[in-house]
Image (cartoon, helix red, strand yellow):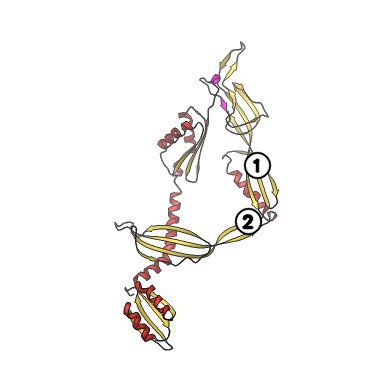
């Protein structure tokens, strides 16, 4: 393999002697070979590629082919063939590894004043960021034990985020004391009540909302006096969870055609030492860029920056709702199931469809039974 980086031109044209004499005055020409029918082949240094091509075009030469040779071109070819595959393998491995960890803690709820305290408390008591080592039930318990302002809390891992959702213990001034009320943590309708102690504020058949005080921590004794007691009851509630999906009979959809252009730059720090690529001739396209270190274990910061340009096309999609009715209903069902608790008891499932021209909205509702108190 030659270490000299040169461009081989094969051209066809008239008055070659005079033209090559003019070219050689400003450009070094190597290995000039003349063939029959006015065809010639020669080499120039890579740096003179554009200048040579311009002179040939000016003198009316027909360029039959252009060929690259040398170490840099072999290196570029290797990167083009195997670099993308290697990069995809590395990215896949990295994605699998990093997806096993949580990267942030998100706290939702009121009052807002304790959000920061809960965040810092959980972060301090979180022994591991590895998903398999995180006990969400234990986190819920220690939050309720630590913060008196919290009446209920749920902890879940969504993607790479630990989400903490808490509800406040809101009490009127006249009800504050050593005992706390029984507060609803759901929206629904009461189906059964088993009161142990305290004063009921709702009856069977009443609709309740999250945050409502179901049982107050006091009773009125026979003397008409208010006496504080523990608010204790078992209240069964039917809860409705609904989600919707909208389908359009006609829509525009953008997708990739499969054609792409790959541009590469090899850099030391911010200095580009070599680049290779093509001009973007796509009318519609999407770009993806990434950088990879070529020498991770050396002091020399050699890296490759790759830009992939994908050609896109926008298509008209005509898909009548009747053809995909069952699939859309199932998608709406799966979307609703995501919001169910792990041990929720499903009592009923139903859906409604609202049509407005070529727009169809499917709303799926799941009825579950939950118990508050106990």
Left or right, residue 300 beside residue 50: left
In the image, is residue 370 part of the stretch drawn in magenta? no
Q: Which residue is mark 1?
A: 365
- The percent position of residue 61, horizontal first and vertical second, equals 43, 81
Residue at the extreme left of the image, as rendered: 299
Q: Nearer the viewer, residue 228 or 19?
A: 19
Can residue 27 be seen here? The reply is no
Q: Position of residue 348 (x, y in %)?
A: 67, 40
Horizontally, is 45 left or right of 38 in the view? left
* Residue that label 2 marks: 251
Please state the horizontal and vertical placement of residue 168, each as a whole percent of the image: 52, 30
How many marks are shown on the rendered structure? 2
Residue at 70%, 54% (x, y): give it. 322
Question: Which residue is rendered at x = 35% and y = 69% of the image?
Answer: 72
Q: Secondary structure at mark 2?
A: strand
Q: Quadrant of residue 313?
A: bottom right
Query: Which residues are drawn in magenta?
Result: 165-183
Residue at the limit of the structure toward the top, as seen here: 223
Circle 1 SS class: strand
Q: Where's residue 147, x and y in %?
A: 47, 29
Q: Who comes first in sequence, dot 1 or dot 2?
A: 2
Q: Quadrant of the C terminus?
A: top right
When the figure is inspected, residue 227 is found, relative to residue 77, above or below; the finding is above
How much space separates mark 1 and mark 2, taking CA atoms? 27 Å
The quadrant of the image that shows the N terminus is bottom left
As for residue 178 lying within the magenta part, the answer is yes
- Label 2: how many Cα within 10 Å (few below 14, some 14–19, many 20+): few
The disc placed on residue 149 is none
């Amino acid at each position: 393999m030659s270490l000299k980086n040169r461009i081989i031109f094969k051209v066809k044209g008239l008055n070659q002697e005079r033209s090559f004499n003019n070219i050689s005055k400003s450009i070094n020409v190597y290995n000039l070979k003349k063939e029959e029918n006015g065809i010639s082949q020669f080499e120039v240094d890579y740096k003179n590629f554009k200048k040579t091509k311009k002179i040939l075009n000016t003198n009316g030469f027909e360029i039959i082919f252009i060929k690259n040779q040398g170490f840099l071109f072999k290196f570029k070819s290797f990167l083009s063939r195997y670099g993308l595959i290697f990069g995809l393998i590395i990215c896949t491995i990295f994605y699998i590894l990093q997806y096993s960890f949580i990267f942030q803690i998100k706290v939702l709820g009121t009052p807002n004043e304790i959000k920061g305290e809960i965040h810092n408390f959980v972060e301090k008591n979180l022994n591991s960021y590895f998903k398999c080592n995180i006990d969400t039930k234990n986190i819920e318990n220690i939050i309720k034990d630590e913060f008196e302002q919290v009446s209920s809390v749920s902890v879940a891992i969504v993607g790479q985020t630990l989400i903490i959702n808490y509800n406040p213990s809101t009490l009127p001034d006249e009800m504050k004391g050593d005992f706390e009320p029984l507060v609803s943590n759901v929206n629904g309708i009461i189906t059964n009540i088993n009161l142990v102690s305290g004063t009921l504020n709702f009856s069977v058949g009443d609709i309740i909302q999250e945050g409502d005080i179901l049982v107050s921590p006091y009773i009125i004794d026979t003397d008409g006096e208010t006496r504080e007691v523990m608010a204790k009851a078992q209240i069964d509630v039917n809860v409705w969870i609904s989600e919707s999906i909208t389908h359009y009979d006609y829509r525009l959809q953008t997708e990739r055609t499969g054609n792409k252009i790959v541009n590469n730059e090899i850099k030391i720090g911010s200095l580009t030492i070599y680049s290779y690529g093509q001009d973007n001739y796509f009318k519609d396209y999407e770009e993806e860029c990434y950088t990879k270190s070529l020498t991770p274990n050396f002091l020399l910061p050699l890296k490759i920056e790759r830009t992939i340009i994908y050609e896109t096309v926008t298509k008209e999609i005509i898909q009548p709702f009747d053809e995909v009715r069952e699939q859309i209903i199932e998608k709406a069902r799966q979307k609703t199931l995501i919001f169910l608790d792990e041990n929720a008891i499903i009592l009923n499932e139903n859906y409604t469809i609202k049509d407005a021209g070529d727009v169809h909205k499917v709303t799926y509702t799941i009825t579950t039974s939950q118990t508050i108190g106990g």
